Image: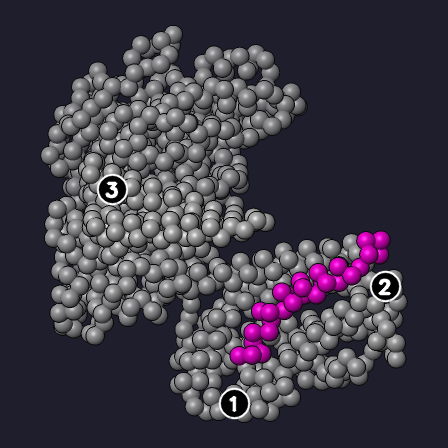
């Protein structure tokens, strides 16, 4: 901040005191009058900023000030000194231009110069971000520090304009809307052939864009603040704050679960999430409200505290339509009444446009509206079933049905409409993949090819273990992912003398299961396991009976049970590698594989084809038809000496792929998919996946790729260019599509012979999903994406299949591996001041955590399909394995 003398401006008390136009001021054109108004507006704004600095900021910044801590002073007046400096210079330039004014002079260029300065907009964004916090600090300090309150009162009386601090701090928020209005008036009174016209148009556009940016930033800041407030009143609602999440509404309802007793609950609906909570009523609190809109925050959530019961992504919530014919007929009648009322309302509006007398029509329409409204109310009140909404939710325990009773039918209807609207918008929030890096993996032996890959589960960072094999040597390359520098291969070492067939990341006991069926490819929250009995737990009133001693004991038990986890949360995370010669190699996730041998080596009797993790168990399928199950030893490790052996197939048709779905395991054995129950160790439902390409051997091709996303099972068969989708509830085929047309489109720039060869043997080689996108790897080296359709438990055959689109970058040879990586990282709000002080009265705002998703493909060579392959560099890197990384 400059000294007081540096901020002094020419004293111009009013427009009449100063004018470059002298005595002719009254006869000037309208354009010039607007310019004088603009100057006067700017002068008053600068004077207000000076009052803020001189009367408030400077006294509070003095070293002898004891009214309020210095860090709080900095937060209250965040950016004000900088804004004053900017606008002082702008006012001087404006004054100089007006002093030399004539009818052809311009003013738009001065505006553009100020508006396009990056630091100006940044300071305004910072100010808007901090404004609400500034007001809160002032309010809290006034109530807790009487001397500070008296200082503010005295300062408001002593300044020339008698302005309070609140009145002064709102002025920067109002500045850009005033600029926009004044520029619009200037444009209106400036002829199109005037040299200033185009400049003013550009300036007005720039103001509008910056205003949108500032308003958007303010809304984001308020949304995050609102999420923090809600997080504070819901016990157990961790990591609720996300830059992409917005709070929509909360409703008080009665709910029953699995035929149990009805309990009073609260629903919190967000743009991507549904929270079901219990209610911990405070004494004297009586709630009769059925629903609240998005303006509701923690400060007026009926004065209650809430306890999280379930946290479900909206994509896992589905509405069940009633099969009761009488109820369906009643619902149809209600829908018809609503439609008729809407039509009559439109007729009322249209009648206003008639030129003739329409009083008779108005009376008739009014009477019909009254009758229909009465009938609608009678229908809604006549049957309480209209207040009931049945939902299915996907939990760790599988698919569960929840019955919700709303206070009124119109609230149920409104909530249902809002839920459907949020789910529809959620499906449109798909970002375009951006390739961020190509990483060559130099071959230490001829013939090394990628076989599998998986990210580690360390909370502090992400490594991706990529396995190479040539049949004689198994090698692991560690790709380290950091914000800075770029992703690099930190080690590449042989670990065995055979091919590595599969790899799995196994979490330690203190880390949420990222591999479980509870987490789909969408950007989900890591949902805490919730037991079904919590739905039927004590009622709201009973929850008040918990004594302070009970709560302390519960907290003590929680702290004891999690002490090992809190000490080193990723200490026991491991990487399991399955080999062709029948071994499982186990490493700690944090081990430097270059200098450390495997922690455990399990010698088995047959090749290990697939390894997965589910609910504190590891399942490994073998080529002899067995599935081995390993359990934890209670000390953070695994009981590896005597795994449970389950016979589910035979050596001619072993389980080649396994995926988790609703706490069960879907197994691929040949061209058959069956459900394996990990509790009973029995096979359940099964179905056969028929081949669609009879000209390609074998006649009954086995399943080569498989994964689950929500209610959808996606798979492809060996030597097939077709991907299929099945409903995981009904096991009916939802859709199938060939990738051949999309691949051929991407290969148009290739040589004819190469294109024909790749098309003749085209097949799907890898599948992965990430943030509602299905990624498809092909033998042609082409990578494809397809939006994942929304599949509900009752979805049948789709009438419309999402398009398959080629990605410009790919591989020269086969796409051999595809994997996705979730990287949590702190996302500082742009321009938000850092809060470092721990002093009393200063609340440090936690950093907003976001999640970054990467998709990694591995294959032979690297190819840019947008360019011709006839260049000199074509084929130079064909023999080098490449990893390609996309930011989603």
51 or 347, nearer to the observer: 347
522 above or below 253?
above
How is colour applied across the structure in the image? one colour
**Would you name the residue on which mark 2 appears?**
105
One can see residue 442 in this view = no
**Would you name the residue on which mark 3 appears?**
330
One can see residue 431 in this view = yes
Q: Is residue 333 left or right of residue 546?
A: right
Give SS at disc 1.
helix
Gap in angstroms between the C-alphas marked 1 and 3: 63 Å
First in sequence: mark 2 or mark 3?
Answer: 2
Q: Position of residue 356 (x, y in %)?
A: 57, 49
364 or 785, nearer to the observer: 364
Residue under the point 13% across and 69% down: 545
58 above or below 28?
below
Residue under the point 24% across and 57% down: 407
Query: Which residue range is magenta in the image?
Result: 166-195
Gap in angstroms between the C-alphas marked 2 and 1: 45 Å
Mark 2 Cα-neighbour bin, 10 Å: few <14, some 14–19, many ≥20: few
Q: Position of residue 715 (x, y in %)?
A: 33, 25
Give SS at disc 3.
helix
Overall secondary structure of the magenta section: helix
Q: Position of residue 829 (x, y in %)?
A: 49, 60
Q: Is residue 789 left or right of residue 509?
A: right
Mark 1 Cα-neighbour bin, 10 Å: few <14, some 14–19, many ≥20: some
């Amino acid at each position: 901040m400059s000294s007081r003398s540096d901020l002094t401006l020419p004293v111009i008390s009013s427009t009449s005191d100063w004018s470059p136009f002298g005595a002719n001021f009254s006869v000037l054109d309208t354009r010039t009058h607007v310019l004088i108004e603009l100057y006067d507006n700017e002068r008053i704004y600068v004077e207000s900023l000076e009052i803020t600095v001189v009367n408030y900021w400077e006294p509070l910044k003095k070293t002898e000030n004891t009214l309020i801590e210095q860090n709080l002073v900095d937060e209250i007046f965040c950016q004000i000194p900088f804004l004053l400096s900017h606008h002082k210079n702008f006012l001087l330039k404006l004054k100089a231009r007006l002093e030399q004014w004539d009818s052809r002079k311009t003013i738009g260029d001065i505006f553009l110069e100020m508006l396009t300065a990056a630091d100006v907009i940044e300071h305004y964004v910072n100010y808007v971000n901090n404004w609400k916090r500034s007001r809160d600090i002032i309010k809290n300090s006034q109530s807790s520090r009487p001397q500070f309150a008296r200082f503010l009162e005295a300062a408001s009386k002593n300044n020339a304009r008698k302005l309070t601090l609140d009145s002064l701090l709102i002025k920067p928020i109002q500045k850009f809307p005033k600029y926009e209005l004044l520029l619009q008036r200037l444009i209106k009174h400036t002829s199109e052939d005037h040299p200033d016209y185009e400049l003013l148009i550009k300036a007005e556009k720039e103001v509008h864009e910056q205003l949108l940016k500032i308003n958007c930033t303010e809304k984001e800041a308020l949304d995050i603040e609102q999420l923090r407030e809600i997080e504070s009143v819901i016990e157990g609602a961790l990591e609720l704050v996300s830059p992409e999440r917005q709070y929509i509404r909360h409703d008080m309802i009665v709910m029953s679960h699995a035929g149990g007793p009805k309990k009073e609950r609260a629903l919190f609906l967000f743009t991507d999430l549904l929270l079901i909570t219990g209610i911990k009523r405070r004494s004297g609190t009586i709630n009769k409200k059925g629903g609240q809109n998005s303006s509701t925050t923690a400060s007026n959530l009926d004065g209650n505290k809430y306890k999280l019961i379930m946290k479900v992504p909206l994509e896992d919530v589905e509405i069940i339509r009633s099969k009761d014919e009488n109820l369906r007929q009643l619902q149809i009648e209600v829908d018809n009444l609503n439609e008729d009322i809407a039509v009559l309302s439109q007729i009322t509006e249209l009648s206003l446009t008639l030129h003739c007398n329409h009083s008779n029509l108005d009376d008739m329409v009014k009477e019909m509206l009254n009758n229909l409204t009465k009938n609608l109310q009678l229908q809604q009140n006549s049957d309480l079933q209209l207040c009931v909404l049945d939902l299915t939710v996907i939990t760790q325990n599988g698919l569960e049905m929840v019955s919700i009773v709303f206070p009124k039918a119109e609230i149920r209807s409104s909530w249902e409409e809002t839920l459907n609207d949020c789910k529809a918008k959620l499906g449109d929030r798909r970002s375009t993949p951006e390739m961020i890096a190509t990483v060559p993996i130099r071959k230490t032996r001829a013939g090394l090819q990628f076989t599998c890959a998986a990210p580690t589960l360390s909370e502090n960072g992400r490594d991706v273990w990529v396995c190479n094999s040539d049949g004689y040597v198994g090698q692991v390359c560690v790709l380290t992912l950091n914000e800075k520098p770029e992703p690099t291969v930190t080690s590449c070492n042989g670990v065995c003398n055979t091919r590595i067939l599969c790899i799995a990341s196994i979490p330690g006991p203190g880390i949420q299961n990222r591999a479980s069926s509870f987490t789909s490819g969408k950007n989900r929250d890591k949902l805490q396991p919730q037991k079904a009995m919590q739905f039927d737990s004590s009622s709201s009133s009973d929850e008040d009976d918990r004594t302070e001693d009970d709560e302390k004991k519960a907290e003590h038990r929680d702290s004891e049970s999690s002490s090992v986890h809190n000490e080193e949360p990723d200490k026991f995370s491991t990487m399991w590698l399955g080999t062709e010669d029948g071994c499982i190699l186990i490493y700690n996730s944090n081990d430097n594989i270059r200098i450390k041998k495997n922690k455990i080596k399990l010698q088995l009797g047959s090749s290990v084809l697939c390894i997965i993790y589910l609910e504190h168990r590891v399942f490994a399928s073998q080529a002899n038809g067995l599935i081995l199950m390993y359990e934890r030893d209670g000390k953070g490790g695994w009981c590896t000496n005597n795994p449970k052996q389950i016979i589910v197939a035979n050596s001619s048709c072993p389980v080649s792929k396994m995926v988790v779905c609703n706490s069960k395991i879907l197994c691929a054995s040949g061209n058959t998919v069956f459900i394996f129950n990990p509790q009973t160790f029995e096979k359940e439902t099964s179905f056969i996946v028929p081949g669609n390409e009879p000209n390609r051997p074998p006649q009954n091709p086995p399943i080569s790729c498989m994964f689950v996303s929500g209610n959808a099972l996606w798979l492809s068969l060996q030597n097939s260019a077709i991907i299929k989708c099945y409903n995981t509830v009904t096991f009916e085929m939802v859709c199938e599509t060939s990738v051949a047309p999309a691949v051929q489109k991407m290969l148009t720039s290739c040589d004819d012979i190469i294109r024909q060869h790749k098309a003749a043997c085209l097949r799907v080689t890898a599948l992965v999903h990430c943030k509602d996108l299905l990624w498809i790897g092909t033998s042609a080296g082409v990578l494809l994406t397809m939006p994942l359709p929304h599949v509900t438990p009752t979805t049948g055959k789709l009438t419309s299949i999402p398009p398959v689109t080629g990605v410009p970058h790919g591989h020269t040879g086969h796409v051999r591996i595809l994997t996705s990586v979730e990287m949590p990282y702190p996302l500082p709000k742009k321009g938000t001041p850092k809060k470092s002080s721990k002093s009393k009265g200063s609340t440090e705002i936690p950093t907003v955590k976001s999640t970054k998703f990467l998709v990694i493909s591995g294959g032979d060579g690297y190819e840019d399909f947008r360019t011709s392959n006839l260049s000199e560099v074509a084929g130079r890197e064909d023999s080098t394995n490449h990893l390609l990384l996309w930011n989603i």
